[in-house]
Image (cartoon, rainbow, N blue to C red):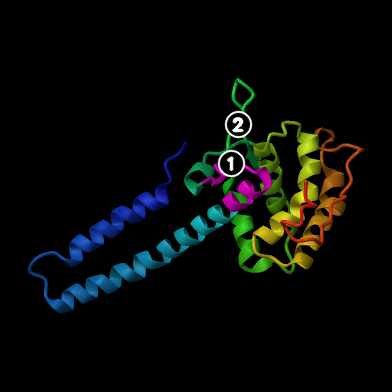
């Protein structure tokens, strides 16, 4: 896996800033100037890092809830990894030679970015890309749960999308709208390997998690 550049760089820069500000012989005014300069430089970057970690933590909660595995989690790809990423998959789950399923749901940088943007302001009118990103999270959670068939995992995910939306902090009405939109607008365009004629968006899309009616 690629070492995340941003947090490493931020830690190094913060350590450097503390060293420069605390350097012996500086006047109080000089220390203040240096401290303000580093605050302006570093604070926005730490804020962006915190946003990213919050998104990954929220996605991990979804994976744990939907898969029923307390050790499960989501791993958001970093920009440093996305720069060299050439695969088409927007997420995946690894399988062991013994048939075991990894507890990690891996998501691309763009997928996590779109989930973050949707959570921070797109819940009422999500773009199609945001709708797909939220669904990808649900789909990978179905794989973590143990389903290996793409078509079956896709169908299970559509019936659980509304629960994902609520778990991510949206309203039940927003959950129903997003789930129904994926079913009507996105699912019909998928390749045959991801669709089955037996699939129906049956699921109580307007119910809250924990009602016992979710797949």
Mark 1 and 2 residues: CB-CB less than 8 Å, in contact? yes
In the figure, is residue 105 to the left or right of 212? Answer: left
Q: Nearer the viewer, residue 156 or 120?
A: 156
Q: Residue furthest right?
A: 197
- Count of numbered marks: 2
- Residue 68 position within the rendered picture, expressed as x and y whole percent measured from the top left: 65, 44
Which residues are drawn in magenta? 59-77
> What residue is at 54 percent from the left and 54 percent from the top?
57
Give the class, few, some or many, for how many residues have Cα within 10 Å of label 1's Cα (few <14, many ≥20). many
The location of residue 174, given as percent across then percent down, is 76, 65
Residue 94 horizontal/vertical position (percent): 60, 31
186 relative to 173, above or below: above
Residue at 23%, 75% (x, y): give it: 33
Q: Nearer the viewer, residue 103 or 42?
A: 103
| Callout 1 secondary element | strand
Q: Which mark is residue 27?
A: none
SS type, badge 2: loop
Disc 1: which residue: 106
Residue 94: mark in rendering: 2
Q: Residue furthest left?
A: 25
At x 79%, y 61%, the residue is 207
Residue 88 seen in this snapshot: no
């Amino acid at each position: 896996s690629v070492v995340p550049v941003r947090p490493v760089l931020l830690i190094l820069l913060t350590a450097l800033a503390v060293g420069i500000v605390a350097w012996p012989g500086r006047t109080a005014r000089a220390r203040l100037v240096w401290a303000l300069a580093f605050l302006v430089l570093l604070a926005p970057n730490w804020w962006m890092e915190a946003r990213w970690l919050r998104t990954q933590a929220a996605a991990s909660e979804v994976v744990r809830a939907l898969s029923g595995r307390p050790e499960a989690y989501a791993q958001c790809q970093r920009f440093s990894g996305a720069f060299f990423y050439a695969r088409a998959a927007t997420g995946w789950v690894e399988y062991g030679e013994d048939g075991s399923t990894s507890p990690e749901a891996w998501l691309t940088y763009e997928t996590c970015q779109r989930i973050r943007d949707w959570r921070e302001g797109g819940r009422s009118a999500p773009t199609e890309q945001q709708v797909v990103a939220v669904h990808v999270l649900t789909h990978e959670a179905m794989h973590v749960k143990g389903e290996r068939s793409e078509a079956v995992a896709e169908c299970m995910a559509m019936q659980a999308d509304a629960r994902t939306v609520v778990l991510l902090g949206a309203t039940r009405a927003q959950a129903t709208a997003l789930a129904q939109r994926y079913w009507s607008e996105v699912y019909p365009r998928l390749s045959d390997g991801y669709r089955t004629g037996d699939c129906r968006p049956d699921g109580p899309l307007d119910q809250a998690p924990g009602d016992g009616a979710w797949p």
